Image (cartoon, helix red, strand yellow):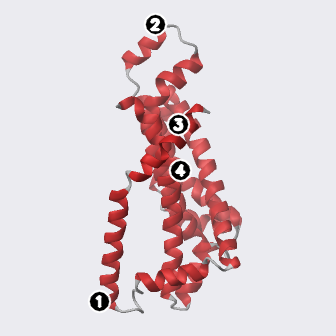
Amino acid sequence: MKFFLKILKDFPAYLWSGWGAVASILLFTALWDVGNQVYGNLVLPSPLETFKTLYAMLHDKEVWEQIDITLYRASVGFGLSLLFGSALGLIAGFFATASMMSRPVVTILVGMPPIAWIVLAMIWFGMGDETVIFTIIVASFPIIFVGALQGTRTLDGALKEMAESFHLPWHMKFTDVYFPHIFSYIFPAWVSGLGMAWKIVIMAELLATSDGLGASLAVARSQLDTPTALALVTIMIGSLMFIEYIILEPIKREVELWRS
């Protein structure tokens, strides 16, 4: 409880430190506007027109239903990847035999293109939630697994000896000694897995479902409705940035205080 109260207490300072990120977003928007003036509204609508379209879309109940569907699929798929990837990666890191046996499987999963998984999932599960969620899991799982595995395998031997010499209970060794080190590896893997999950959910919906933001993007493409397509992309990127920078990053900063 104290951990989360500390995060809330430090949150205003964290937001204030984000001026650099805001400046880069404003620079990107300025370059976007330059692109609009060069290529015209059909190819690249202006930021103003896109944000007007986005504002109108956010007042549409059906758009929120599509956002909910996409968030549900991404959350379930990423949540399962995070759970199994972290747990199995930690187990594989602590046991050399499990690590050796799991590496070929991880290599296969990493090497398989996500589009191939989507095609296979469409054959196995048809057009629906299962196809999207399955594809997210197989694409995000190996990233998280490898992060947990590396974090565990790179534990300092002296640190382990120190924990053993004090005869600490197993749960204290894990949470107070091992976890801060493992977290510095596994957290970036979670963030990368989240980014992968968000990309995959849109791609899978675009190809394999009739609802969700990906399907809406397919409709906008077929109608050459570029402002709506860009507004949908803005929603996707905005959601991902909110999760990463407003939810995950403050937790990371708090856990990694021991480094300073």
Callout 1: SS: helix
Quarter where residue 32 is shown: bottom left
Disc number lying in front (4 or 3): 3
Q: Which residue position holds label 2?
A: 165
Callout 3: SS: helix
Q: What amino acid does circle 1 point to?
A: Val
User: Which of disc 4 and disc 1 is earlier in sequence?
Assistant: 1
Q: Residue at x 37, y 67 (%)?
A: 25
Name the quarter where the N terminus is drawn: top right
User: Which of disc 2 and disc 4 is earlier in sequence?
Assistant: 2
Are the residues flagged by discs 3 and 1 in contact, CB closer than 8 Å?
Answer: no
Measured in 3D between alpha carbons, the distance from the residue under mark 1 to the one under mark 4, in whole angstroms, is 37 Å
Which numbered disc covers residue 247?
A: 4
Disc number lying in front (3 or 1): 3
Q: How many marks?
A: 4
Q: Residues within 10 Å of mark 3 (few under 14, many from 20)?
A: few
User: Which of disc 3 and disc 4 is earlier in sequence?
Assistant: 3
Measured in 3D between alpha carbons, the distance from the residue under mark 4 to the one under mark 3, in whole angstroms, is 14 Å
Which numbered disc covers residue 136?
A: none
Q: Residue at x 53, y 55 (%)?
A: 243
Q: What amino acid does circle 4 point to?
A: Ile
**Residue 152 at x, y = what percent?**
46, 30
User: Which of disc 1 and disc 3 is earlier in sequence?
Assistant: 3
Callout 2: SS: helix
Q: Which residue position holds label 3?
A: 6
Quarter where residue 26 is shown: bottom left
Does residue 52 lie above or below 108 as drawn?
below
Q: Which residue position holds label 1?
A: 38
